[in-house]
Image (cartoon, rainbow, N blue to C red):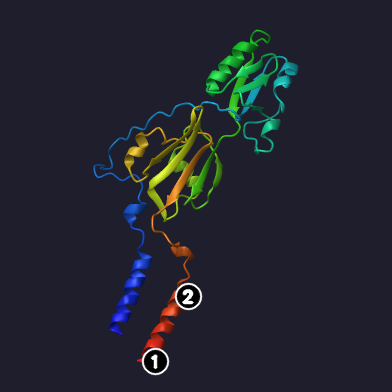
Amino acid sequence: MRALFLSVIFLTITLTSCVTRKKLTYLQSDSFNGDTMIVTVTPTDYKVLSYDNLFIRVVTPDPRVSEMFNTLPSTSYGISVTEQSADLISYPVDGNGEISLPYIGKLHVEGKTLTNITDEVSSSLRDYIADPAVTVKMINNYVSLLGEVKRPGKYPIYKDRLSIFQALAMGGDLTDFSDRQMVQVIRPTTSGNIIKEFSLSDMSIMESEFFYVMPNDVIYAKPMKGRIFQMNEFPFSLMLSTITTFILMFNYIK
């Protein structure tokens, strides 16, 4: 009976201590003393891809000319845009990497930054329009969180420098059963998709170009190896009831 009791205790401890604190801690470093300055990399500017959607606003002294460019002249930058409505207020980039603008016609934008496109549109319009003020922004500015995230889904990138930790925070952080040593970022580029796997427990992630997320990034959090169930989903009441019944039967037979 004593051996059985010890076995039950051992089983309970094993089930409730599957994940150690070391496996859950971010940015670990043996040499970090709390005063060390960590210099993060400067993120590169996003380069537009085919099938992106660009919001282009042109303001000129002539409101009639401005209206030709702005599908919704009163559109504010805080408007809530869905994938279904993006085409209505944006200029979609076609499969050839081009957009079609009034006066300018076809303009190749794939592989260019928003600053590059703004300068090119402004320069081209000066041949026809006096003093055009041009603003170019991304419509499909999202990051997708998949895998062992508390709230997987697609989230808007609300600022230029959004770190991977800020992106995960929007999804409620990783679950306790996420393998923080094997997190993947899938990043589309003009040359194809890049898959980068790294450890969020290693402080050196802050020196990586993947520390800041880009539009259309997919962050995939892998589950830990050997994971069978989540502790918050395990029916402990059923387990305890089964153990109690087993002990009673064992005593009765004995």
What residue do we see at 65% from left, 28% from top?
92
In this rendering, the answer to whether 70 lies above or below 144 is above
Q: Amino acid at mark 2?
A: Leu
Q: Reading the chain from its start, which is encountered first: label 1 or label 2?
A: 2
Query: Where's residue 39, x and y in %?
Result: 33, 32
Query: Where's residue 174, x and y in %?
Result: 45, 51
Quarter holding the C terminus? bottom left
In this rendering, the answer to whether 118 lies above or below 178 is above
In this rendering, the answer to whether 158 lies above or below 228 is above
Tags 1 and 2 touching, CB below 8 Å: no
What residue do we see at 56% from left, 16% from top?
119
What residue do we see at 36% from left, 59% from top?
19
Query: Where's residue 122, x and y in %?
Result: 60, 14
At label 2, counting other C-alpha atoms closer than 10 Å, the crowd grade (few under 14, some 14-19, many 20 or more) is few
Residue receiving disc 2: 238
The quarter holding residue 14 reads bottom left
What residue do we see at 44% from left, 35% from top?
212
Q: Amino acid at mark 1?
A: Tyr
Query: Where's residue 207, x and y in %?
Result: 35, 34
State the residue in front, 48 or 24: 48
In this rendering, the answer to whether 252 lies above or below 195 is below
Q: State the CA–CA distance, disc 1 to disc 2.
A: 21 Å
State the residue in front, 79 or 232: 232
The residue most toward the right is 64
Q: Secondary structure at mark 2?
A: helix
Q: Secondary structure at mark 1?
A: helix
Question: What's the mark number on residue 139?
Answer: none
Residue receiving disc 1: 252
The quarter holding residue 72 reads top right
